[in-house]
Image: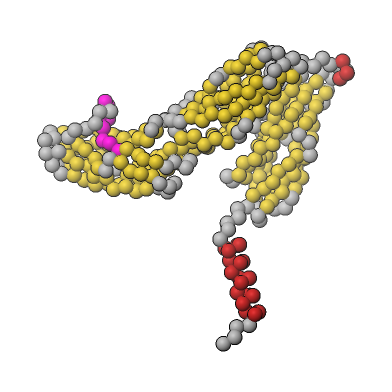
């Protein structure tokens, strides 16, 4: 039987279409840009720029626009503005000075959010005295800072290093101090720290150094939008680099979420321990039943298994057995299930009534 070339061609075209469109998942997204990213205020109290939002991959929805730091500047006389996007749109944004803004150079950041999509646009703003002739202005010593990264993924209890470059201008010299803040200027979590916190800059010489960001093993998993603030000793110069930090490790819980058990001497009971990896965590987790107060291993009440290997990012439901020794005394034992991997530690506190 002869098969026509037309049917073969149609089969191949359908096969290609399946692999191109059936196997690939293209998520809706947006592209953003501004008509100008440098503003100079000389006697004016407000300036207007235009933000172009371009939907791609069929995006439709609401987009929220805000300034990351609103202590000295406002956006459209508010803290944020929201627009509906179904096709490309130019959005007018009026940036207004607060009454207490002093003549200086400022780094601003536009934040554009829709659902889980977050975009940033950097703006450089110069505020000048109106009665000073630009030709007569004396360039003040200052500096700029840059980083070789803008995103980090660090496990709880871990750290990661990256490079910061300080570029002095107009013969700046002195100490540059660093502090970690949330991207909106509020205090960052005490579970996240940076080192060093100060660097000396020789006269007009660029300095590149290694900064280390460390995370406590008790930090809450999730995404942190942060900024590193750099300022001089007189606190008249402020510069920023912005970093998105993903921190994880794993979370644990019992299922069902029962923390009270009654077990006869010499017997055992079973429950499920659900382990949920965060931020790409994989590796071996050690499990142990401990005294809730001292953290010492329990001798008369034990738990198996004592270890599990997490090989991908999917939650794992592990069947565990809590065993009471035949030598245990009747009473209530206050214990904790300990799950550790390196410096990452997770605990679930349980009460076991032995009878």
Percent position (x, y) of residue 79?
66, 33
Q: Is residue 211 above or below residue 223?
A: above
Is residue 99 in sight in this rendering?
Answer: no
Q: Dividing the image into 4 quarters, which one contains the C terminus?
A: top left
> Looking at this rendering, what residue extends furthest in the left direction?
327
**Which residue lies at the image location 73% right of the left edge and 41% below the top edge?**
33
Q: Give the image quarter of residue 40.
A: top right
Foreground residue among 5 and 103: 5
Colouring convention used in this rendered image of the protein: secondary structure
Q: Dividing the image into 4 quarters, which one contains the N terminus?
A: bottom right
Locate residue 105 relative to residue 218 in the image: left or right: right
Q: In this view, does 237 lie above or below 114?
A: above
Asked if the stretch drawn in magenta spans residue 126, the answer is no
Q: What stretch is highlighted in magenta?
A: 287-294
Percent position (x, y) of residue 284?
36, 40
SS assignment for the magenta stretch, majority: strand
Percent position (x, y) of residue 29?
64, 49
> Looking at this rendering, what residue extends furthest in the front direction?
2
**Which residue lies at the image location 59% right of the left edge and 86% below the top edge?**
2
Is residue 230 in sight in this rendering?
Answer: yes
Q: Give the image quarter of residue 128.
A: top right
Foreground residue among 63 and 4: 4
Locate residue 136 relative to residue 186 in the image: left or right: right
> Looking at this rendering, what residue extends furthest in the bottom direction?
1
Locate residue 265 relative to residue 54 in the image: left or right: left
Q: Is residue 139 above or below residue 317?
A: above
**Which residue lies at the image location 63% right of the left edge and 17% below the top edge?**
176
**Which residue lies at the image location 24% right of the left edge and 44% below the top edge?**
321
Q: Is residue 312 above or below residue 236?
A: below
Locate residue 313 relative to residue 335 in the image: left or right: right
């Amino acid at each position: 039987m002869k098969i026509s070339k037309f049917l073969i061609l149609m089969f191949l075209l359908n096969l290609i279409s399946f692999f191109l469109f059936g196997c690939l998942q293209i998520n809706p997204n947006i592209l953003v840009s501004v008509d100008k990213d440098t503003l100079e205020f000389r006697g004016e109290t407000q300036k207007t720029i235009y933000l172009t939002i371009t939907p791609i991959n069929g995006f439709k929805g609401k987009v929220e626009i805000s300034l990351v730091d609103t202590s000295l500047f406002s956006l459209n006389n508010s803290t944020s503005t929201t627009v509906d996007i179904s096709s490309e749109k130019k959005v007018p944004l009026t940036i207004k000075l607060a009454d207490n803004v002093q003549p200086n150079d400022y780094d601003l950041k536009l934040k554009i959010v829709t659902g889980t999509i977050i975009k940033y646009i950097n703006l450089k703003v110069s505020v000048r005295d109106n009665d000073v002739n630009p030709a007569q202005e004396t360039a003040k010593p200052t500096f700029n800072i840059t980083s070789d990264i803008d995103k980090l993924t660090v496990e709880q209890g871990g750290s990661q290093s990256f490079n910061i470059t300080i570029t002095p201008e107009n013969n700046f010299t002195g100490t540059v101090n660093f502090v970690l803040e949330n991207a909106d200027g509020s205090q960052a979590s005490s579970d996240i720290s940076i080192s060093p916190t100060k660097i000396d800059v020789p006269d007009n010489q660029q300095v590149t150094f290694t900064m280390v960001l460390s995370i406590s093993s008790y930090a809450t998993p999730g995404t942190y939008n942060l900024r590193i603030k750099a300022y001089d000793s007189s606190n008249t110069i402020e510069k920023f680099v912005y970093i998105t930090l993903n921190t994880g490790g794993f979370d644990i819980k019992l299922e069902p979420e029962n923390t009270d058990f009654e077990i006869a001497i010499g017997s055992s009971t079973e429950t499920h321990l659900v382990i949920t990896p965060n931020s790409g965590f994989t590796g071996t987790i050690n499990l142990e039943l401990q005294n809730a107060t001292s953290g010492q291993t329990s001798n008369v009440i034990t738990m198996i298994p004592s270890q599990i290997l997490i090989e991908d990012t999917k939650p794992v439901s592990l069947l565990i057995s809590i065993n009471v020794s035949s030598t245990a005394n009747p009473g209530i034992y206050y214990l904790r299930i300990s799950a550790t991997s390196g410096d990452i530690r997770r605990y679930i506190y349980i009460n076991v009534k032995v009878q």
